[in-house]
Image: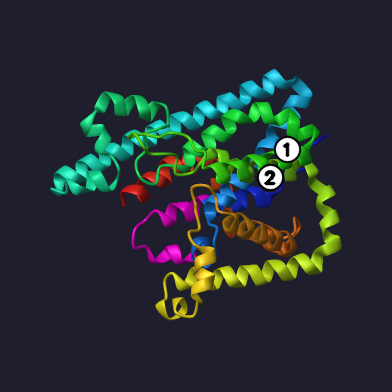
Amino acid sequence: MTAAARDIRLDLFRGLALWFIFLDHIPTNVVSWLTVRNYGFSDATEIFVFISGYTAVIAYSRMMQREGWPRAASRIYRRVWQLYVAHILLFVAFSAQIAWVSIARDMPALIEEMELLGLGENPYRAILEAALLKFRPVNLDVLPLYIVLLAAFPFVLPLVVRWPLWVIGLSLALYAATCRFNWNMAAYPEGKVWYFNPMAWQVVFHVGAACAVLGDRLAWLDRFRWLLTVLAVVFLLFSAFIALSWHYNPLERLVPHWVSRQLYPIDKTNIDILRFLHFLAVAWMVRLLVPIDAAALKWRGWEAPCRWGERPPLLFLYGAHPALTG
């Protein structure tokens, strides 16, 4: 089965997601109010992971069909290596910058705040764990998640190309089991786990991959367009109200206690179901409001975010480091 054709929206929205992640990592940044995290349960991470799964199928399924699975797998692992090197370089630059600021400004607490104490207490162990992606400073979690998901993708690729609905079902089953039994991957120092749990976040990546394969077959959902749109709009408005109440106390007082008890905590580590549903609602509305031939996509102002979306590791290197140390 051939994957769906690539379109400009993929690079555009992935580029915007990376830019939003950049802005959200800058403390007390007024511009971050432009990002999606302030207006709902999900944020730019879901957008990035979903589109990464979608584009992975487009890129590598064609190669697998033309040149065989071994060739496609080798190209995927070449990409994984590039991402791994990007992460290690970012880790080194980030750690050096935090150490310099801590010494220059006499701020020893900054080391603990940025979760770099392990590097001073047991440097050899910390370096080893960093190489294994288990030791990560604060906010340096997205690339390792992407690396793990992509490293497993060669084994998923032939399955999702042939049986996309089965892959969605198995992915949802793993997600449900992960949330039910609290599975996660160990991190460093001892007792820590991955902030973005790959066993939970894989559901976003694999649903994105399956959507790329299904392509026009998803048009059957249009038979329920009115109902799905109403549900999506209502849920998006509700989540926007709740999200704004986190920043504006008068709104928080309007949220009944029984609603709060049902909603919280909205877990990001295991991508709470509310986050996942919110992202699906956003994706549905984008599908309706921004079709592939939308005139707004031709605006020249979108050229920059499209370029960012084409080269995510470079944006992580040149953008994330100033944001994280800002």
Is-magenta flag for residue 112? Answer: no
Magenta segment's dominant SS is helix
Identity of the amino acid at label 2? Val
Left-right relation of 280 to 24 = right
Q: How many marks?
A: 2
Reading the image, the residue beneath label 2 is 207
Q: CA distance from mark 1 to mark 2?
A: 8 Å
Quadrant of res 156: top right
Q: Which mark is residue 167?
A: 1
Q: Amino acid at mark 1?
A: Val
Q: Earlier in the sequence, mark 1 or mark 2?
A: 1
Please state the extent of the stretch shown in magenta in the rendering: 18-34
- Residue 63 in percent (x, y) is at 73, 27
Give the residue drawn at x 72%, y 21%.
69
| Quadrant for the N terminus in the image | top right
Label 1: how many residues lie within 10 Å, few (<14), some (14-19) or many (20+)? many
Q: Is residue 24 magenta?
A: yes
The residue carrying pointer 2 sits among few (fewer than 14), some (14 to 19) or many (20 or more) residues within 10 Å by Cα, namely many
Q: Can residue 77 be seen at all in this image of the molecule? A: yes
Is residue 24 found left or right of 65 in the rendered image? left
